[in-house]
Structure formats: C-alpha cells, structure tokens
C-alpha cells in the first residue's frame, strides 16, 4: 500500500522508522500524486505553507489516520470525505493517566503548602483519598482511564459526559447534571474534546458552582474554559488553583496573565504526547483494516466531532 505522510517535515525522522517497522508492507512517502495514495497519515501543521489540505484529490485513499487524539483541526474540512480515525494508543493513555493522577495527588496532598522556610506546619494534614471528591469531565477513552486510576487510589470519582454512558465502577452523570458534577468537584479534571458544545463550557456561571478552593486540571482543550472568567474566579478563590496544559493559542504568549498569576500552574502541552513506539502499531493496524475493508479503530463521528 502507498501512504502519504501528511505531517510537518520535522516529524519525518521521528516517525518514519517506527511506522516502517510496524508496517513493512507500506510504501511511506512525503510527496506524490494525490490520486496514487491508498491512505494518509495526518498531523496538524500540514501543509506547512498554511493552506488547507484538499482531501478531494485523494480519490484512492481509504482512510485518514490522525496522529493526534484531537481532530478538531481537520474534522470540519469540507473536502474530507474519507473515513477519519483519531489516535488512541496505550502510551498516550498512560501519559494522560500519569499527568492527571500526579497533579490530582499534588492538589489533594497540598504539597505546595509546605514552604521550606523553617515553619513546622503540622496542622496541614491532608484528608484520605476516600474523603476527596474528584469530577472528570469527558468520559471517553482517556477520561475512563483517568477515572479508573483515581478510583483505584480510593478517591470518590464522578464522571460527566453529554451522553452519560455508563462506566463500570464510576458514577457517570449526563448532560443536564453538569451543575451537580461541578458542585461536588473538589478537584476537576477536564478531558473533553473541542466541539461547538464544549467551547467556553466553563464560563463564569459554571465556575462559580465549584467548591471554594477547588483545583482545576485542564488537559483536554484550551477552548473549554473562558480565560477571562477563570482569572476573575481565581482571584475570588473559586477555584483556588488551576493547572493548565492546553491553551487557545500555543505556545502560550510570554505576556499572558496565566504566567504571572499565583494560582495558576502552566505546563507546556505535555500531558499526553503521541509516542511513535506505541502509536505506530495502532496506525499499522488501521491501515491493514482499511486495505481489507474491515471496521476501523477509533473512527471519528463527524456529527459529534470526535
């Protein structure tokens, strides 16, 4: 099969060896006639001249496999009629679990309260996990994994999604119950995709529903939170802190108020990177499925956008 690597040039040396090892029958190319390719492997930033890729020219392509879990930069392209698959791989999921669990534990244990200044703060004893309530917004592949890990540590975990689809061992609330999900969130973990329904989901009104001193951990999409409303809410202590890994514009501008705010921790979009070693076998499996006409893994629902 002939496959176009439709990704920024800087990713070629990183990805091509792993992809070829996982799928040796593939002819992986960086360029060529669009109608000669059986599939595309896509990452945002392509084409690098800033133009919009015309998928209608790829008349033979049976699948477009994204290297990112988020597909908001491609799913609205009107020329994209081929099946689109998002990336879900074990390494990406494990990375997200580790990030969210680590920051949730840091917030739960109050690690930043122990200043190394010679003062014995023996009164700052954290509660047990069973006494701490965590809400996970977004119960897709990543949300379910994070919720399961936190529940396994003993936290009282509530999930929320628009559908409210049940998840074994986790209480999941549906769309209209968002206020309830927020009001019990001493730690709020945001793992929702970027869609028309989720943009600015956490506005001033909904942020005010959080318990005083709550911690927000946003590793989903920067568009989920109204930035101006969040800054004002942080000044009021509701929430008490925000750990932000994703932003509306990246890299985050050096003069952005988040950098200087005492109640914000900025991390540079590192929560869950796609690692070639674990992702390449997923790509290979989907390419083979497409060539055989079999059901694809992690097929994107165009209506919902993920």
Image: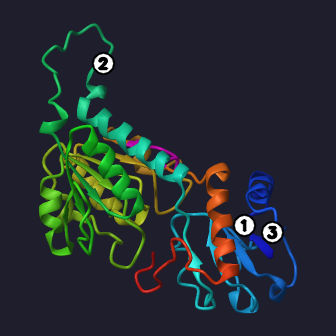
Q: Nearer the viewer, mark 1 or mark 3?
A: 3
Residue that mark 1 sits on: 7
Q: How many marks?
A: 3
Circle 3 residue: 26
Position of residue 71 relative to residue 91, above or below, is below
Outermost residue, top side? 118
Q: Which of the 4 image quadrants contains residue 180?
A: bottom left
Q: Is residue 268 magenta?
A: yes
- Over which residues does the magenta segment extend? 265-271
Cα separation between marks 1 and 2:
45 Å
Q: Can residue 48 be spotted in the picture?
A: no
Q: Is residue 186 magenta?
A: no
The secondary element bearing badge 1 is classed as loop
Q: Is residue 124 left or right of residue 96?
A: left
The relative height of residue 271 versus residue 173 in the rendered view (above or below) is: above
Badge 3 element: loop
Mark 2–mark 3 Cα distance, whole angstroms, equals 55 Å
Q: Which mark is residue 115?
A: 2
Residue 278 at x, y percent in the picture: 62, 51
| Numbered mark located on residue 80 in the image | none
Which of the two residues, 8 or 19, is positioned nearer the viewer here?
Answer: 19
Q: Quadrant of residue 140?
A: bottom left
Most common SS among magenta residues: loop
Q: Earlier in the sequence, mark 1 or mark 3?
A: 1
Can residue 185 be seen from the camera position used here? yes
Q: Is 241 on the left or on the right of 133, as rendered?
A: right
Q: Counting other residues with Cα less than 10 Å from the Cα at mark 3, is it few (<14), some (14-19), or many (20 or more)?
A: some
């Amino acid at each position: 099969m002939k496959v176009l690597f439709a990704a920024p040039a800087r990713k070629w040396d990183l990805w091509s060896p792993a992809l070829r090892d996982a799928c040796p029958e593939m002819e992986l190319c960086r360029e060529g006639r669009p109608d000669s390719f059986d599939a595309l492997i896509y990452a945002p930033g392509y084409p690098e001249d800033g133009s919009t890729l015309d998928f209608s020219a790829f008349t033979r392509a049976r699948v477009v496999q994204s290297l990112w879990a988020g597909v908001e930069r491609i799913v609205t392209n009107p020329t994209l009629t081929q099946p689109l698959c998002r990336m879900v791989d074990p390494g990406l999921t494990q990375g997200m679990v580790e990030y969210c669990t680590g920051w949730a534990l840091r917030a739960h244990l109050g690690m930043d309260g122990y200043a190394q200044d010679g003062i014995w703060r023996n009164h700052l004893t954290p509660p047990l996990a069973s006494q701490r309530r965590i809400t996970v917004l977004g119960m897709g592949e990543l949300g379910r994994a994070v919720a399961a890990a936190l529940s396994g540590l003993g936290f009282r975990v509530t999930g929320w999604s628009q559908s409210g689809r049940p998840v074994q061992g986790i209480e999941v609330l549906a769309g209209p119950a968002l206020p309830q999900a927020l009001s019990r969130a001493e730690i709020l973990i945001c793992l929702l995709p970027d869609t028309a329904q989720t943009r600015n989901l956490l506005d001033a009104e909904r942020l005010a529903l959080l318990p005083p001193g709550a911690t927000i951990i946003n590793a989903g999409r920067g568009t989920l939170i109204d930035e101006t409303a969040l800054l004002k809410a942080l000044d009021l202590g509701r929430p008490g802190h925000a750990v932000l890994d994703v932003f509306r514009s990246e890299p985050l501008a050096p003069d952005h108020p988040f950098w200087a705010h005492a109640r914000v921790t900025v991390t540079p979009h590192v929560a869950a990177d796609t690692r070639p070693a674990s992702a390449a076998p997923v790509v290979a499996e989907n390419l083979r499925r497409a060539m055989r006409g079999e059901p694809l893994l992690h097929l994107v629902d165009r209506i919902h956008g993920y």
